[in-house]
Image (cartoon, rainbow, N blue to C red):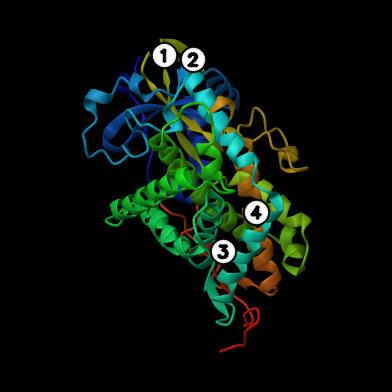
Amino acid sequence: MSPAALPDPVPLSGSLLQEDPARVYREMRREHGSVVPVLLDGDVPAWLVLGYRELHQITGDAVLFSRDSELWNQWENIPEDWPLLPMIGRRQPSILYTVGERHRLRAGMLTAALEAVDPFELRGYTERFADELIDGLCSKGSADLVAEFAMLLPVRVLARLYGFSDEEGPALVTALNDMIDGRERALAGQTHLFTSMTALVAGRREAPAEDVVSRMLADTSGFTEQEVVQDLMVMMAAGHQPTADWIGNSLRLMLTDGRFAASLFGGRNSVAEAMNEVLWEDTPTQNVAGRWASRDTQLGGRRIRAGDMLLLGLQAANSDPQVRTDGSALTGGNSAHFSFGHGEHRCPFPAQEIAEVIARTGIEVVLDRLPDIDLAVPAASLTRRPSPWLRGLSELPVTFTPTPALGGTLA
């Protein structure tokens, strides 16, 4: 059967999915198994893959489960104003939707450009921008670490790595967060990011430098400036929001779970442990769209039709009881989670490493500069943004003893 013919598809929305996704995934798994018929906005049918093994199968077979959205059998039912079009687009020119040899070459270009990032410079940029952000709030004694720190840090570092000047950074932060906000400012944010990226690529074509953009332009695979711009925009968006949520979710865990209390007094191992636990239990990227079946097949006992869309349930797969028989996955930095994807369309390894350095360094700066930090509200009152795709805090209000800015004095 196709998803539309099934009697019991589950709407991929609702407050419970925001408040307690683990419960939702458990109930889905109990009632439907590892592959669940779901409805997206506008009652558009899809399959949500919850099983670890099934997700491994999908992401490991790029021929049967293609990234080519042109295969989708629902395009005739999709209106032009469908809210998920920016995420599940048609004929999108970025690396997200290229397949085969063209994708391999494109991924190689991105990977090489990111691998060349100097790790000492990366940490130095992150520390500098993190200190600047803490300087702006440390004298107040209270702050929202989501709005005033986590949502501002990753894009500033990424912009510097790409080749933007520090003066251009704040406007890029505003543009990207406006895009994420998804309301009336989203189009203006996207326009600013595209215009800025286009100008940077054109400038680096004329005058190369030691940055990611210049290295991508030096690649000999024949990609156009327009393709480079699209990939840079994808990398900026994919690198910023999940990393910001990784910072926020990790700080929340450290401030609410007694196992990590030592890290609030200068410990370092606990930071890495908290970040790893978040990737398993509270991963920023909960679900990803998508893959499209290139022919009729079977998956998890379900009959999948050619052109059906499959959503990757990353968080649900991480908590699959078939592979999580004990808590061992959370120890020793186990990285067998799906938080960065799997297969040829996974997040490139250098990008994962960059995100980890930004998140860990940012958290360490917070703990160094605000050593007596504490939640300003009960943990149970913390809320999440309403999204089935990305899981992050709406805010993280904290209190601390006011301290002077570096090189400054208390106002």
Residue 398 is drawn in which quadrant?
bottom right
Name which residue type carries label 4. Leu
Q: Are marks 2 and 4 in contact (CB under 8 Å)?
A: no
In this view, the mark in front (3 or 1): 1
Q: Looking at the image, is mark 4 or mark 1 earlier in the sequence?
A: 4
Q: Is residue 96 visible?
A: yes
Image coordinates of residue 79 in percent, x first then y, are 21, 33
In this view, the mark in front (2 or 4): 4
Residue pointed to by mark 4: 122
Pointer 1 local density, CA inside 10 Å: few below 14, some 14–19, many at least 20? many
Element class at badge 2: loop
Rendered residue at 37%/42% (across/down):
13
Q: Looking at the image, is mark 4 or mark 3 earlier in the sequence?
A: 4
Q: Is residue 345 left or right of residue 229?
A: right
Q: Are marks 4 and 1 in contact (CB under 8 Å)?
A: no
Mark pair 4, 3: CA separation = 33 Å
Name which residue type carries label 3. Ala
Image coordinates of residue 338 in percent, x first then y, are 60, 34
Residue pointed to by mark 1: 294
Q: Looking at the image, is mark 2 or mark 4 earlier in the sequence?
A: 2
Determine whether 323 is above or below 168 in the image.
above
Q: Are marks 2 and 1 in contact (CB under 8 Å)?
A: yes
Residue pointed to by mark 2: 63
Mark pair 4, 1: CA separation = 41 Å
Determine whether 212 is above or below 90 in the image.
below
Element class at badge 3: helix
